[in-house]
C-alpha cells in the first residue's frame, strides 16, 4: 500500500532544497506551496516570471496535484493559457511519480521560449517599421503608380472640379452683365440723359444763348476763293494770287 503522505513529505524537502529562494509553504494540511519561476534574461536584460501554486491531492502522486498561476510578470494572456495547458499535459504524463520538479522545469523552459519570442517579435516589428518607412520614402520620390482605376478616379474628380469652376465663372459673368448696361441701354432706360448736359450747365448758372443772326449774316460776307485764282497752286502753300 502506497504511503502518500511519506512521498509528499520527501518531495517537499527536496523542493525546498532545490528552490531555497523561491519556495514558500502556504499550508501543511493539505500541503500547499508556491514556487516562483523566472526566465533567463533576454534582450535588454528583461525577464518574464510566474509564481506557481501547488496543492497536493489526497492520493498524490497517483492523482495530479492542484495547480494555478498565483502571480505573473510581463506575460500576455495567451502565455498564461499556454502555461496552464503545459501543466495539464505534464501532470497527465507523470501520474504515479512525484512530478513537481518536472512541472516547474517545463514551465521554466516555456518562459525562456516566451522571452525568445518577445525578442523575435520585436525584431519583426522593427523590420516592419523599417520596411514601411522605406515604402513611404519611395512613395515620396516616385509617387503613386498610375493604373486605369486610379486614373479614371482622378479624371472624374478633375472634371467635376472643372465643371464647378465653369459654373461659377458663368454665374459671375451673368451677374456682371446684368449690372453693366451699354450706352444705348442707358438712354433707353433713362430719357433724362438726352438733356443731361444742358441741365448740368443750367444748374451751374451757365445759360448758353445762341444768336442765330450771326449765321444769317455769313451769307453777306465776301470770301475770296483761292480756287478762282489761276495762279493758285495747292501743292505750294507759299503761292499767292498776286505777285
Image (cartoon, grey):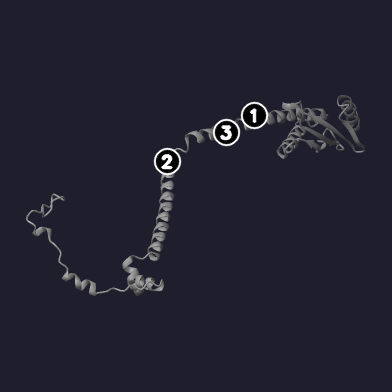
Q: In this view, does 163 lie above or below 11?
A: below
Is residue 72 at least partly visible in the picture? yes
Circles 2 and 1, Cβ within 8 Å, touching? The answer is: no
- Which corner quadrant holds the N terminus? top right
**Element assignment for label 3:** helix
Return the residue nearer the eye: 120 or 126. Answer: 126
Q: Residue at 47% of width from left, 34% of height from top?
A: 142
Position in image of residue 163 (x %, y %) = 40, 54
Is residue 2 at least partly visible in the picture? no
Return the residue nearer the eye: 99 or 119. Answer: 119
**Element assignment for label 2:** loop
| Residue 213, quarter of picture | bottom left
According to the image, label 1 marks what residue? 123
The mark nearer the N terminus, 2 or 1, is: 1
According to the image, label 3 marks what residue? 133
| Residue 44, quarter of picture | top right
Instruction: Determine whether, in the image, residue 130 is placed left or right of residue 217.
Output: right
Amino acid at each position: 500500500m502506497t504511503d502518500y503522505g511519506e512521498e509528499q513529505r520527501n518531495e517537499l524537502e527536496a523542493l525546498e532544497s532545490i528552490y531555497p529562494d523561491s519556495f514558500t509553504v502556504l499550508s501543511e494540511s493539505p500541503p500547499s506551496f508556491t514556487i516562483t519561476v523566472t526566465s533567463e534574461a533576454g534582450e535588454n536584460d528583461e525577464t518574464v516570471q510566474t509564481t506557481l501554486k501547488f496543492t497536493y491531492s489526497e492520493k498524490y502522486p497517483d492523482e495530479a496535484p492542484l495547480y494555478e498561476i498565483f502571480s505573473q510578470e510581463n506575460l500576455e494572456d495567451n502565455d498564461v493559457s499556454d502555461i496552464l495547458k503545459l501543466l495539464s499535459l505534464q501532470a497527465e504524463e507523470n501520474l504515479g511519480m512525484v512530478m513537481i520538479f518536472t512541472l516547474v522545469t517545463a514551465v521554466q523552459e516555456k518562459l525562456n521560449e516566451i522571452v525568445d519570442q518577445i525578442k523575435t517579435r520585436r525584431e519583426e516589428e522593427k523590420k516592419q517599421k523599417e520596411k514601411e518607412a522605406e515604402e513611404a520614402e519611395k512613395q515620396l520620390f516616385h509617387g503613386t503608380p498610375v493604373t486605369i482605376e486610379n486614373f479614371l478616379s482622378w479624371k472624374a474628380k478633375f472634371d467635376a472640379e472643372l465643371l464647378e469652376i465653369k459654373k461659377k465663372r458663368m454665374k459671375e459673368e451673368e451677374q456682371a452683365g446684368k449690372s453693366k448696361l451699354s450706352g444705348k441701354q442707358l438712354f433707353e432706360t433713362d430719357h433724362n440723359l438726352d438733356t443731361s448736359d444742358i441741365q448740368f450747365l443750367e444748374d451751374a448758372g451757365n445759360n448758353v444763348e445762341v444768336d442765330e443772326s450771326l449765321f444769317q449774316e455769313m451769307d453777306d460776307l465776301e470770301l475770296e476763293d483761292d480756287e478762282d485764282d489761276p495762279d493758285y497752286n495747292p501743292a505750294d502753300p507759299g503761292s499767292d494770287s498776286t505777285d
